[in-house]
Image: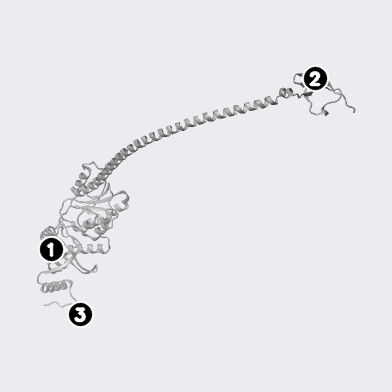
Amino acid sequence: MEKQRETYNERPVYSLSEITKSIESVVAKTYTRAYYIKAEILKLNYYPHSGHCYPELVEKEDGKIKAQMKGVIWSNQFRVINERFLKMTGDPLKENIGILFLATIEFNSHHGLSLFIQDIDPSYTLGEIAKNKKEVIERLKKEEVFDANRSLKLPLVPKKIAVISVETSKGYSDFMVTLKQNHWNYCFETELFPSILQGDRAAVSLVTRLEEIEKLKEKFDVVVIVRGGGGDVGMSCYDEYLLAHKVATFPLPVITGIGHSTNETVTDMVAYQNKITPTEVAYFLIQQYNNFAVAVEDMQNTIVQYVSQKLVTQRLQLDQWEESIYKTARFIVQTKQMEIETTQQSLKTATLRFIDLQKRELERFETTVQLLSPENILKKGYSITYLNGKAVKDKTQVKENDILTTRLYDGEVKSIVIHDKS
């Protein structure tokens, strides 16, 4: 006898299992085959201990989730799919990539509605990666920063180097050995900033290291990002906008040597220089150092040659000046000697004339003196009267009874003054 169904408000009540079985039946009848579906892996949810993977699949529109559903990849299928995906794309299955997959749609009472993924087409993902790469390049060019880092000026001697790498990696070791053991013994100063260099977390890690270096930018001349080996595996992180934009707008020249040769990443494109291997990066820096050293040596040789030529020219000029000065001095001396001799002769002649003139003048004075001497005057009949030894020139000088002495040419006469009463 069939059990009577429970009702509520005159409507039948169903158990949860009845509903899930009904949905399961409808889904099984409706979706009878596998379908090709495109979506983006939001979260991978891979469990290494079991090997199973339960990706969260989404469809986005304008950055917002439009649809969401969970997927299931059993361990055997995941291993095959992941190996093929890695071989063709260079990356394992990871989050935030677009995929085209073949899946059946199943509903389970315990796990709900799921997409059971049987295969994933790597070529579609490659197309999505290329599309995303193109979009990142166009975005950077639109923002006018694509060529910003390449437009910077590399210091003449890039001596102080900030290195982003892993200390234990072969690429870092090759870079350091080549740099330090250069033929010319150039000295470089390096500081390591350890970072994840591949995989999902690499872009964020690299940007974090660049931000640390930017705060210390006055300490460095250049930034180097190097990794070794691995081919193109895990390289898609270098196409991410976050990292490419940071490198493009970085205030110091950035040089990449991330060990790949098939595809040039966006980060390589916007970097100041990109080299395939860390060793080539080291050679590039050594060459810059050497270019400067050669230029300095050439300039030194040029200066030495110039100074040598200048010294020879100056020596010749000095010799010429010395000869000219000697001849000029000799001419001046000879001229002055002639002038002195002429002056001496003139002086001698003038002196003799002057002496002769003075002699004649003295003779004339002597004659005059002789003519005017008292003896000559007295000789002519003149006399001189003295009173008390003084010549009398006026009668008022004498008085009665004064005794006067009159000097004549041949003697003296004494007389007494008598008062004239008449």
Which residue sits furthest top?
411
| Mark whose residue sits in front, 1 or 2 | 2
Q: Position of residue 403 (x, y in %)?
A: 83, 21
Q: Quadrant of the C terminus?
A: top right
Looking at the image, which is closer to me, 64 or 131? 131
Check disc 3 and report the residue beneath it. Answer: 11
CA–CA distance between discs 2 and 3? 204 Å
Looking at the image, which is closer to me, 322 or 153? 322
Looking at the image, which is closer to me, 189 or 297? 297
Q: Position of residue 128 (x, y in %)?
A: 17, 64
* Looking at the image, residue 357 lies above or below residue 207: above
Q: Position of residue 253 (x, y in %)?
A: 27, 53
Res. 397 image quadrant: top right
Lower sequence index among marks 1 and 2: 1
| SS category of the residue bearing label 2 | strand
* Looking at the image, residue 323 lies above or below residue 232: above
For disc 2, the neighbor class at 10 Å (few under 14, some 14 to 19, many from 20) is few
Q: Is residue 188 visible?
A: no
Res. 314 image quadrant: top left
| SS category of the residue bearing label 1 | helix
Check disc 2 and report the residue beneath it. Answer: 413
Check disc 1 and report the residue beneath it. Answer: 123
CA–CA distance between discs 1 and 2? 174 Å
For disc 3, the neighbor class at 10 Å (few under 14, some 14 to 19, many from 20) is few
